[in-house]
Amino acid sequence: MFNNHKHLIDISEYSDSELMTILTTAKAFSQVNERAIKKVPTLKGKTIVNMFNEPSTRTRSSFELAEKRLSADTLNFGGSSTSTVKGESLIDTVMTLDAYKIDCIVVRDKHAGAPYIVSQASPAVVIDAGDGKHGHPTQALLDLYSIWERKQDFNGLKVGIVGDIAHSRVCGSLIPALKIMGAEVTVVAPGTLIPAAPEVLGADHVSYSLDDVLPELDVVYMLRIQRERLEGAPFPSLREYHQLFGLTKKRERLMKPDAIICHPGPINRGVEFDSYMADHPERSVILDQVYAGICVRMAALYLLLGGADNGLSA
Amino acid sequence: MAFLLKNAHVVDPKGALDGVMDVKIDGDKIAEVGADLDAAGCEVIDLTGKVLVPGLVDMHVHLREPGYEHKGTIESETRAAVRGGFTGVCSMPNTDPVTDNGTVVEYVKSVAARDGHCRVYPAGACSKGLKGEIISEMGDMVAHGAVAFTDDGRGVQGAGMMRRCMDYGKMFGKTFLSHCQDEDLVGEGQVNEGVVSTRLGLLGWPAEGEELQIARDIALARLTGAKLHIQHISTARGLELVRAAKAEGLPVTCEATPHHLFLTEDALDGTYDTRLKMNPPLRTAADAEALIAGVVDGTVDAIATDHAPHAEWEKAREFELAPFGTTGIECALGLVLTELVNTGKIGYARLVELMSSNPRQILGVECISVEAGSTADLTVFDPEATWTVGEDGYESQAVNCAFEGRELTGRATDVFVGGKHVLANGAVC
Amino acid sequence: MGTTPKAIIMDEVAINRAITRIAHEILERNEGCENLALVGIVTRGDLLAKELVEKIEEIEGVRVPLGSLDISFYRDDFATFAPEVHASKIDFDVDGKRIVLVDDILYTGRTIRAALDAIMDLGRPSRVELAVLVDRGHRELPICPDFVGKNVPSSHEENVRLYLKEVDGRSTVEIFDVEPGARVGSAPLGGE
């Protein structure tokens, strides 16, 4: 229990100070992750199930490391052995897991709203590790952390999110989180990749031109283009997408000197950006984001799985 | 068996009746209507304070039998219909096997005759297997009692195919009930495209996906001369198209469901309540408001429920995996009374048009008047009864009611079907 | 817990006197400050450690390494209590060091148990000693301080707290009544 939050599903239920507590707690865990012994006994005896009903190597690995570094016992459940593949309903699967006497379920599912269903079916703490095109709160937290480390202050920070906004679970959490923290958000994409009502997520501006908005941005957040989804044909070719929306060396001259580049990974070189920008030593924080993922997930687990009393250190 | 229904407030716009009187039923017919009728030989039922109207017909119901008896059966869903105050329902053809030939029509009718609590008017499919490819045996179905044609649940995708259905089928004089959904535009849409689809991260089902086919079918009605009835209309612009078609004098009618009238997409939230997943989806408050205006001004001809029972386990799933549909036949009358009559938007006479005479006329089934000699299909409701949807469970086999928990004023108490007392003081006989 | 103390056990003068004496004792026990490092437990122990480091510098002319340790991740009551986490700050290698852990009030010993585990996860000190300003008794673990400012007999229905000028505006050790079973601990930084 973290204040009155039992789960981490809808990030918009968290206040700016609560999000900041998660970030400062993540900072403390960052120290643990930099030690020779990267483990603390905090969650000793707790059992956490990573219920990944759709494949996701990165997010699962990050959660698993975070859990292990907190000394929790972890169980990876899902993949091709998923019982839903065998016809079992999600609710029945969750009730089965509960019979193992578990404390927390980390849910990744291709269907929006699945974490809520899990939270209703189980007394365990539920953390959304990405549900359909809906949300991905720990991704949003690690993005906030990475931005915070570089920019210190979110107030008035201009963040541009470029790419498949419409089908992005990342945006469903990141845009509301940035708004809670006081940032200004512009979404940039062709019309086929803009959701029906971007303002509902909190986007302040919509642009079809990367060149137009680039000079304003403090943070350029490139979203992954799903090569595998291209048969839906939201744009004619990767080549044209790269020409119009790719962050290239040529476009760097349009950027603020201290603007940074984020990406949730995995990156497509030659699509979202060229290698020069992806690897940019000053601007790219892509690998920092990967590292931040462990820290914020440790923080979220620590805060949610701790006692109800959010008291004082003794 | 003879009944004397005493002191009922009889409302029948056709006979221009609106006052307290007695109605005597003898056998399957109304024997006499008037003041202080002789009770000799009759079971007397005092209906003081209650309203008696020509039997209500729900022209859009999924009975699920044959094929989907785990969701509902002709027995269970006509039981629910009677509890809701209906004397008849039009059954949709998306059964298994599809009701696309005389044999299945005959089956539905025979099961209804054996197990049913009210009349069942089967609609037959426009196309074989609801596939939108080959015209179904409409003539055979009509010969066996089909009252209308529809590919409800999908709609006929090809304009050419829809035209062939209408051109062929018009010789039978039946109405084409059209489910308007352009599959290419709607795709896997789950909820109304816009605010809710964005917030919940669900694929959008745009209003235009419905409006395109409404416009198309109106054009085809003009082209073919066939009678067209737009099912479960859900958008303001779609209704505008129907309004214009009527002004043009085309044989076009439409129905609206209680859920599109009295619920909006705003009800959908982070709980992903699958009871609120229906097709077409819940639209905006502005759409619902326009539909209510259409009900009041006559553009909407009928209120029909699209009663769609599902097994509990089918709905207890991820939103995107749960089937579309809500039940509604048990609360439709209560909703119309509460939301439209008690608020002064419409009177009882308009209610009778919307839920009895217009559906009967569109389906071409017997029209009922509260007069001597008419078939005794009658609905009685208590306009003062207050109740909460779902508080005592449902007569339907299914529990997927989007209105669960809604507090209503007005509920059916008695139903007579062909003179048979099938709902007596709120209990299905 | 009552907001008014029922007694002030140590005033600023007494606290400073105790710090001076402990600094001398640390130097005496360790025969100088070679390999010596002080690690204070947040919150307040870290501030005491800083004062001790300054005192040692006054005496020996050498500034020994100073660290602060947050033990939140090592507590044994996490199931009922998730404390606010503060960053630890230990910029030196603890391997081979003579570490003096510094805390304000020694009570059950559980904080020190957690601190020992936390230190061990950072490396392998050659030895660890414990300095506390107040020992109020009631140990629940076999832990014994090496350096004590003042022994204060107390009951379970009491809490003893250190306030420091730097963060609290006054330097005192105060004793309060508490409800039986209530959590006791340091005063929050920045007031109640």
Image (tube, coloured by chain):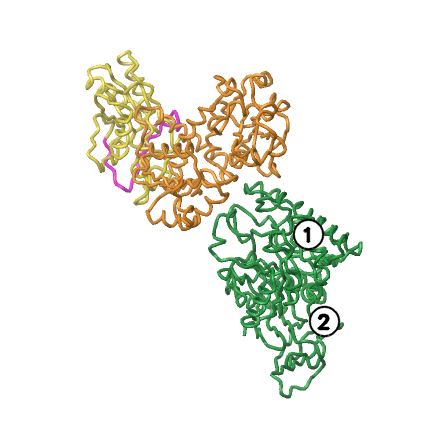
Chain colours: A orange, B green, C yellow
Q: Most extreme residue toward the top, as rendered?
A: C61
* Mark 1 secondary-structure assignment: helix
Q: Secondary structure beneath disc 2?
A: strand
Quadrant position of residue A203: top right
Residue C163 is a magenta residue: yes
Query: Residue B236: horizontal and vertical position, in percent?
Result: 70, 49
x and y, in percent, of residue B330 in the image: 57, 64
Q: Which residue is mark 2?
A: B12
Task: Return the residue nearer the eye: B254 or A296.
Answer: B254
Residue B271 among magenta residues: no
Question: Can residue A156 be seen by looking at this rendering?
Answer: no
Crowd around label 2: few <14 · some 14–19 · many ≥20 (10 Å): many
Label 1: which residue?
A: B162
Q: Which quadrant does the N terminus of chain A fall into?
A: top left
**Closer-to-camera residue (B335/C184):** B335
Residue B31 % position (x, y) = 69, 81
Percent across and percent down for residue C180 are 30, 45
The magenta-colored residue range is C151-172
Three-letter residue code for mark 2: Asp
In this rendered view, identify the residue nearer to me: C98 or A126.
Answer: A126
Does residue C49 appear anywhere in the picture?
yes
Residue under the image location 25 percent in, 36 percent down: C108
**The numbered mark 2 sits on a residue in which chain?**
B
Amino acid of disc 1 = Met
The picture quadrant where one finds residue A108 is top left
* Label 1 or label 2, whichever comes before in sequence order: 2
Q: Is residue A17 above or below residue B25?
A: above
* Residue B175 in the image: above or below residue A133: below
* Chain letter belonging to callout 1: B
Quarter occupied by the C terminus of chain A: top left
